[in-house]
Amino acid sequence: MTTVLDFEKPILEIQEKIEELKKMSQESGMDVNKDIEVLEQEAEDFKRELFSNLNPTQKMQIARHPERPNFTDFVNRMCTDFVELHGDRVGTDDRAIIGGLAKLDGKPVMIIGTMKGKSTKENLEYNFGMPQPEGYRKALRLFKHADKFNLPIITIIDTPGAYPGISAEEHAQGAAIAMNLREMQKLGVPVIAIISGEGCSGGALGLAVANRVYMLEHAYYTVISPEGCASILWRDASKNLEAATALKITAPHLLKFGIIDGSIKEPVRGAHTDYEEMAAEMKKTILSALDELSGMSREELRNQRYDKFRKMGAYIG
């Protein structure tokens, strides 16, 4: 059963009324089809109106939905012949970042992403989608492999941030992310990044220095989580709506500021309600971007990526 978010409860109430009418019709033989049609249309209209006017924290709830499709859900529906490549070649295989070779519409690509689980056991395996330094080093190894063999790179990002534990700091978390930022800029192949759920801080940026950066409609992308920001500014994490509004974390704002290149439409109630439709929309966006980038030389790809990120944050008073 799909988890119902707080703001979705009015939709559930209408659907329960529809089910009651259907049951009553079957038991009594009364013709209530017109009433059912009216309620179904009312539910559909309310649903579309609600999901087209979500505030940032409501979008965050969808981005964090426990049933939201993860990296392997997308790979299994978009790609064929996926072969996972393990390890950072130093001694560790961080499961919070998964990557490997695959074919997208028959063309070989390198696809890498952060991984979340859907159960407690899976989340423990994938460290709740929070990579350690070894994960970023594994990703960097795969980036360089793709660059050597002239393979386009696709990254799918859904992380609350890089793991902030003592062990990660001892293993140079900041240096690992910084190395990725520098080396991704040097890649001579097309790089496409998609924020599929949460895109927090350097943990997300360590996989997102790309020629094209896209977000799913209800994903969010931010320098710090709204709760973290609220805790710092107001000493009160419950002020996350004020923080999320000020941070401009949703796709429309980030598109306006030139941080991302486009938003990928989700099914009405979110990506978790239809994996197939969501994967098809994502694949269409990726193929279109690859088509645009395929005519560029290695130097042009580097320059385009460099110019894109140099422009971010520019301010003229």
Image (cartoon, helix red, strand yellow):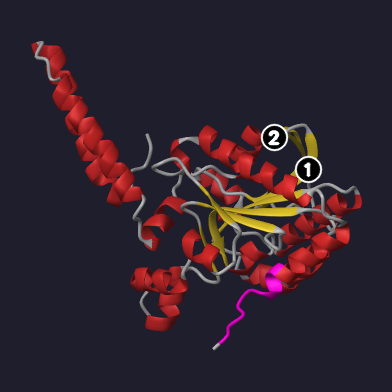
Residue drawn at x 78%, y 43% is 109
Queried whether the magenta region covers residue 312, the answer comes back as yes
Q: Secondary structure at mark 2?
A: loop
Kindly identify which residue carries mark 2.
79
Q: Is residue 64 visible?
A: no
Q: Is residue 140 above or below residue 75?
A: below
Front one among 307 and 85: 307
Point out residue 32 in the picture as x, y percentages from the top left corner.
Answer: 13, 20
Circle 2 crowding by C-alpha within 10 Å: few under 14, some 14–19, many from 20: many
Point out residue 51 in the picture as x, y percentages from the top left corner.
Answer: 35, 49
Residue drawn at x 78%, y 63% is 184
Q: Is residue 21 left or right of residue 288?
A: left
Q: Is residue 55 left or right of residue 135?
A: left
Front one among 114 and 253: 253
Q: Secondary structure at mark 1?
A: strand
The image quadrant that residue 304 belongs to is bottom right
The three-letter code of the residue at mark 2 reads Cys
Point out residue 4 in the picture as x, y percentages from the top left corner.
Answer: 33, 43
Residue drawn at x 83%, y 47% is 151
The magenta stretch is 308-316
The three-letter code of the residue at mark 1 reads Val
Q: Is residue 18 above or below residue 173?
A: above
Quarter of the image for the C terminus: give it: bottom right
Q: Is residue 226 left or right of residue 192?
A: left
**Callout 2 touching callout 1 (CB < 8 Å):** yes
Queried whether the magenta region covers residue 130, the answer comes back as no
Measure how far apart labels 2 and 1 are at the Cα level.
Answer: 9 Å
Residue drawn at x 30%, y 43% is 47
Circle 1 crowding by C-alpha within 10 Å: few under 14, some 14–19, many from 20: many
The tag on residue 231 is none
Q: Main secondary structure of the magenta part?
A: loop
